[in-house]
Image (spheres, rainbow, N blue to C red):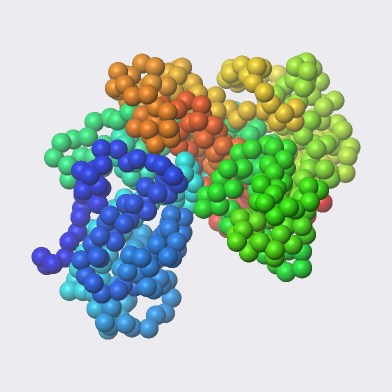
Amino acid sequence: MTHKVRDRASASGNWKKRNKMATVSEHGLKRVVWQRIKETIIEDCKKSEIWKILILDHFTTKLLSSCCKMSDLMQEGITIVEDLYKSREPVLEMKAIYFMTPTAKCVDAFIGDFKLKPKYKAAYVYFTDYCSDELFNKMKLYCGKYIRVCKELNISFLPQESQVFTCDNPGAFRSIYSPHCSQDKVKTLETLAAQIVTLCATLDENPGVRYKKETVLENTTLDNAKQLAALVDYKLTKHYDMDDNSKKKGKTQAQLLIVERGFDPVTPILHELTYQAMAYDLVPIKNDTYKYKSKDGSEKEALLNEDDQLWARLRHMHIAEVSEQIPKLVKEISANKKQPDGKITISGLSQLMKKMPHFRKQVAQKTVHLNLTEDCMNHFQKNVEKLCKAEQDLAVGSDVEGVKVKDPMRTLLPVLLHPHGTYDKIRAVLLYIFSLNGTTEENLNKLIQHVKIEEDREFILNWRELGVPIISSPSFFPMRRSSRRDRTQEETYSLSRWTPVIKDVMEDAVENKLETREWPHQSECPAAWNGSGAVSARQKHKASTQDERRSGSRLIIFVIGGISYSEMRSAYQVTQSVKSCEVIIGSSHIVTPMELLDDIQALSKPTTTKETFTIVKE
């Protein structure tokens, strides 16, 4: 079978010969992934001038959608994109590209296209990751004569944003933390480890691996971070040992830190007032799609991603700044047309679009964000503003004047007495408990009765599965709290004083200040590694522009159990401030506060399907 190729060593070998370091710029991870796909799948297929069909499974559909558009595929000679699992008409004169995950389901669907009667002239097969011998031999047996290429790309993660990735596996949370899924945990950790390795390979990194020290709570040791770190390190070594480069790859100027969700329970349930985090918490945005009504009453929708330059520019700003920025941006456009200087309204923008066709796209973009900002502000003024002061005081441990909160119950009580929604009250109660590092069972029962969730106390109790203390006792030895960085000199809004703990970790890591006792090394990175560039003799360049600093070091953070939008923002903020180190953050999935609470509540359910107690938002 000399005409068929199976690149066991993955497609990354040729990539590395052309690029000493996978440079991240513009849309970062998305750009790197699209480049990898182009330089393997597209280049292989360009050798034939015949226009081709691209066949995808569910994961690869998401993967391609995250990093390219249909117009990009058209430019590369791909005219049709099909679903692997759907019935398709044969097109015998065309060659088909199969981009799929190496699972039995995908391979069986592929074999079905050729076993009895071929649907296409030939098949170019590309797997996201390592394909087992069993599946490969099965394909070879039934359709060997039709396969022209068979390669493994080593891309089994989703590039969500330029510096954010996920493993597209929300179910991992239950598999790892539910007492009913202990058998699934090892397999889930194995899968996550393999996906993290493909991220490192895509970035051409072989990082040193560290993890947050395991938590001991109620005689139970939570060591998922330690287990995952060992798996990742083993798989990284194996990956680079079997690579097609003759020289074994040593450790690169990168660190990978692995931490569990319970490490910081406060950040993912706090009401955030930065644009992206606030919008995803308060507005019903599904699959990054925001739906709203235009002035004429028609339904509109907009995709919130980095192709929208305004979204990329505004998403990490405080809502107060966004509210100021959008009208200014609209006025910049309208100034040349002598528009009145009054308040910018949605109806005014509609009139502007009719009068100025040339600027229609720009104005439409700003209309989306004017609508979304108004939605956020309506929620804030109606309900959230009253919650934020109490939440911030409980989270930070002091009020806006810096006076320590001596009696957290006095801070919590106004929230419980106000007719807030049940989810909001649960969030406040949790912040109260976290501030005390656990409360008495008697006090907890009173709080649960007050919030009226007697039948669904799992919203609170199940945090124990994440290693977070909920119930304290006289004999309970309190957990040592990590010291926080002093940010008293930083300018903040009074209702946005809390800083995600992961930001402290990022800054400590790039300054080589992480304590080995708290962050043990699974594998050492080079002794000269210093994300800030202050120590490393290798970093002689003066990083100034975004592209230049990408030749520096990388810090990769993986949070087991989901990341919040606030933590994602921290990666960009630290990258901007440090200059010589790029921070990339990832997890099994991204969570909003309500999604996380539902996942927590479902942990004690014995069923495999997630059955959550749905509280109607008030």
The answer to which quarter of the image holds residue 350 is bottom right
Q: Is residue 435 left or right of residue 57?
A: right
Task: Tell me where residue 141 appears, x and y as whole percent.
Answer: 20, 71
The answer to which quarter of the image holds residue 424 is top right
Q: Is residue 261 left or right of residue 203?
A: right
The residue located at (24%, 78%) in the rendering is 121
| Residue 34 appears in view | yes
The residue lying furthest to the left in this view is 2
Task: Tell me where residue 451 appears, x and y as whole percent.
Answer: 82, 41
The residue located at (69%, 37%) in the rendering is 321
Q: Is residue 338 above or below residue 426?
A: below
The residue located at (52%, 35%) in the rendering is 572
Task: Tell me where residue 443 appears, x and y as whole percent.
Answer: 80, 30
Q: Is residue 611 above or below residue 225?
A: below
Q: Is residue 260 left or right of residue 455?
A: left
Task: Tell me where residue 190 appears, x and y as whole percent.
Answer: 38, 45
Q: Is residue 192 above or below residue 6?
A: above
Image quadrant holding the N terminus, namely bottom left
Closer-to-camera residue (79/251):
79
